[in-house]
Amino acid sequence: MPNAIDPHAAIVTEAGGLDQGGTLRTADGQPLKAALARSSRRARRRAFLLVLPLLLFVLLTFVLPIGQMLQRSVKNDGFSANMPQISAWFAANPRGTPPDEAAWAALAGDLQAAAEARTIGVVGTRVNYDMPGTRSLFTSAGRQIRRGIEPPYREALLAMDEDWADPKLWSVMREASSAYTANFYLAALDRTRDDAGNIVQAPEQQRIYVTLFQRTFWLSLVITATTFLLGFPIAHLLATLPMRKSNLLMILVLLPFWTSLLVRTTAWMVLLQQQGVVNDILVWLGVIGNNQRLQMIFNQTGTIIAMTHILLPFMILPLYSVMRTINPSYVRAARSLGATSWTAFRRIYFPQTLPGLGAGALLVFILAVGYYITPALVGGSSGQLISNLIAMHMTQTLNWSMAAALATLLLVGVLILYWVYDRLVGIDNLKLG
Amino acid sequence: MALPTYASPLEKVWHYAYLALCAAIFFFLIAPIVVVIPLSFNAEPYFTFTDKMLSFDPEGYSLRWYRSLLTFGMANPDAPGGLSWWADAWQNAKWVKAAKSSIIIGFFSTILATVLGTLAALGLSRPEMPFRRIIMAVLISPMIVPIIITATGMFFFYSNPCEPLTWIGLNPECGRLAGTYLGVILAHATLGIPFVIITVTATLIGFDQSLNRAAASLGANPRTTFFRITMPLILPGVISGALFAFVTSFDEVVAVLFIAGPDQQTIPRQMWNGIREQISPAILAVATLLVIFSIALLTTVELLRRRSERLRGLTPS
Amino acid sequence: MKRLLILTTALCGLGFAAQAQNKEVNVVSWGGAYERSQVEAYNIPFAKQTGIKVNMIAADNPATPLKAQVEAGNITGDVFDIEVSDAIRLCDEGALVEIDPATLPPAPDGTPAAEDFIPGALQDCAVANIFWGTVIAYDKTKFPDNPPTTAADFFDLEKFPGKRGLPKNPKRTLYLALIADGVAPDQIYETLDTPEGVDRAFAKLDSIKDSVVWWEAGAQPVQLLADGEVTMATGYNGRFFDAMVGEGKPFEIIWDGQYMDMDMFAIPKGSPNPEAALEYLKFATDTQRLADQAKYIAYGPARKSSAALVGLYQDGKTQMAPHMPTSEEHMKTAVMDDPEFWADHSAELAERFNAWLAAN
């Protein structure tokens, strides 16, 4: 091919050139395409290897533990592992079979073994989760059976407590006889199973979780709205001031951001309590009488105020970085075309801040939904969020499967929001200070 | 921001109202942090301003809560001062012990998070990184997932780290991580990692990859290139990432509540107890010290950010 | 990579170092003024005598972390200060070390420990140190003319306005509601054993629900009263005593309907320092130590032989006997704790209580 005058061809020729079939080749004679592919594979591998140690670390110390928690939300072998005979009977007989003497014998044998092994409390606790009020049935039966039990077992157990014949109890035991169950999710949605195993709403005095999910959602919305109302003017001021002044004022935003969460929460306790600084000032100003001091803490108000303060920087920072890029001449153009300042703001300026607003609002909402420390300290009983209920099941009632089920529901909600955030804002655009 | 000369009187009023509103919001941001400082000098053991404090009577003020930070938990706080008194405070005082735990945990978790996080950020900011988006999402998630969920998962896992092996049929014994320094350090490193990644990748966005290629073409091997070219340029980002990771660990209480043992009682853990139990302005004394600490950190980070922007040829903003 | 290796080695070293430490004992107790009294009366002399270091860990109720640690197989505390019902329940579940009374030190006059302790104070797996009462206290400055005197007054928001502080658990709230509703102290458990009785207690609590500030840690009711957050609160009598006599706060205690309980020391199976734990338990429950504790807080010692040694408060002038929950005067209307009832029913009543609390 007479193309020696083409400079590109010259380079190609020097480097390796075209072969008979017209394939580009490198200096050592390999097809260029393959070489490029190999080198990009190598680059990909090298990049991946840099990330790999951390990825493994996070998978091991973070993702795996959460997976383990998910497993716990559907698995609880407190009954099945300690009551093998009656579990076998349930497996062999379909739902609806009335308990025969073999079932009663299996139950009595299991109760006796569990009482000896001191696991009867575990069994009772497991059944109690699905049917509140039954733990004592098991523990007191255990105490009596340890002294011995004679057939006929049905009569012997009924003599201890007539509740042993309750069909609801047998239905619950059947549920518990399998280690895997969805009942904790049902309970987390205030649902339960009736005697026949149908899903129904829980009795009114036991319904709490749906209310708490709703409250968490609602309070997070309110907090997002207040951070927006307070954050927007500040971000606007910072974005329009000259750099030197705005940098100085920015410190006032960043200082709370860097201050310990517990310090800030303590500070709000000091300020908001009945004999606290805010009430003192209001009384001193004569706004309220000394005996009309406001209740601003240990309730929802306390949670909202303290969390607004804590999450405010997460709203201001993204708003600020977007407002910085807005060209002021658009607003000026609008004004010069006769728009009032309000119209110019509403039609020209505000729409341009929406990306920052979306980023800030989503971030604040995501963080608020999972908040624990602040509501625990200043929320009283009406300002508690779903996180506090998870903590309660973890540390006080020790119903860990329930805690795991609630945590899973919360996690799903947060991950959906996180996904939306990544779609709309991009995780890369998260900024700190 | 000055008013344009064509502003109407109404706009002027609105403008000053707006400035007043901003001042009020700044006050809302800062006042709670400032208010703890005078209260930490309260002579009375409660959280409110006393009459004596309000009339600036020196008797209303005292350093007793700062002293109590040292004496609380000491074997013999009333012994005459001197070396043995200080040795006692160093060994037994609860807040001193808490400070030591916090520093140990903060130091090691920061190193772990910074080393792993920086490496990963270098990989993530290469254009050829595969599955970039999903991996980034996973690595940032410890910051997004509610801490109570993370702590719950860690509680189960760290109590018996071998449990997941039983899923594949193995049944080894391997002790536990809960109640050890190692456990808390690993947990805090996990929580600090997103901050390192975010700050270091932010520094790398403005990073000119041709600098690396230039170094390579001049004969530097990748190692030399990294330490002589890349590292000095991203160092400010790495350090502020490390500071974020340190603060995260230094301020973390939920994971500590769930997985720490009696030897790992950190400052926030001790404060948590204090706020709920032994309520005294000693908490406010600690808070004051922590506020001073955060001011120092904030200053450092600000200076680093400006330096980084100068190095990368951006105008400081 | 090498550095990483060194780092991981160092980290592992740290992990093991924490487990290899010796000669210390971790005691989980209730925090606040009560913890201070135990530090003064038990820990300091114990460390002097044996050289074993005592780490105090505060909890709202030490039985909660104990149960969690047992359940997770992750026991970090050695000695737990718990209530009788929890001691019985955990002993039933095989979680606690059994303690032979014969190994406990006898009284100074040689009476064996088994006879020296007040009946009920020795359980299979736990040894009591003190008797304590949950009582109502109010701020005197809020009711100068016509002070409240009974449990029923606590529920009377018209005559005695202001918020109320109550503990966030069923055990120390339901009994009070029933007493205030006219149930006799010795009928409390019979009533609570029926669904109607439980409903009755909750109905009474409903009447003040909107005015209640709930507390969890023993120091909180004192703080709530001192801050003027509430005008009346129930709490542990020793804490109120500490604030009244120790800090000079204007509080007054109503002994009507006090709830009497014991605190016991127990050691979980598999604790990190079992020998030191047992040594501590024996030391802390001897005659002199129990009497010493009363010098710092108004709780009654669990040994008969200690009573004679109880003298003045640490200020050197206040007689302790009239402030004790165990004094004859205060025992008249006291509700005694029924550990068996709570061992069986605490889980289900807690569930009902939490649901009631969350619904508003």
Image (cartoon, helix red, strand yellow):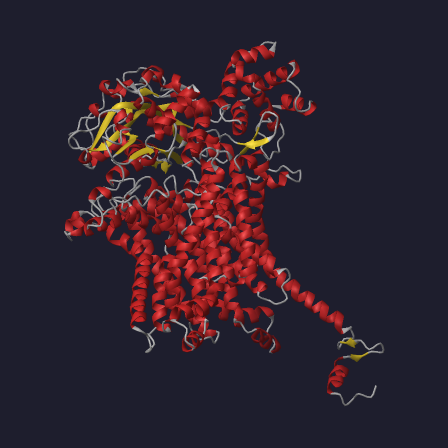
Is residue B108 visible from the viewing direction of this image?
A: no
* Above or below, A153 relative to A32: above
* Nearer-the-camera pick, A109 or C142: C142
- Residue lying at the far right of the rendered structure: A20
Residue A339, x across and y down, in percent: 41, 73
Give the position of the C terminus of chain A as an image quadrant: bottom left
Give the position of the N terminus of chain A as an image quadrant: bottom right
* Above or below, A153 relative to B269: above
Residue at 34% across / 76% down in the picture?
Answer: B4
Q: Is residue B195 left or right of residue B86?
A: right
Residue A361, x across and y down, in percent: 46, 57
* Above or below, C90 relative to C165: above
* Nearer-the-camera pick, C74 or B60: B60
* Nearer-the-camera pick, A103 or C289: A103
Residue at 51% across / 57% down in the picture?
Answer: B194
- Residue lying at the far bottom of the rendered structure: A5
Residue at 31% across / 36% down in the picture?
Answer: C211
How many callouts does the rendering have? 0
- Residue lying at the far front of the rendered structure: A338
Residue C7, x across and y down, in percent: 51, 54
Q: Is residue C329 left or right of residue C343?
A: left
Residue C147, x across and y down, in percent: 19, 29
Is residue A47 visible from the viewing direction of this image?
A: yes
Dividing the picture into quarters, in which one does residue A22 lie? bottom right
Q: Is residue A282 left or right of residue A137?
A: left
* Nearer-the-camera pick, B317 or B101: B317
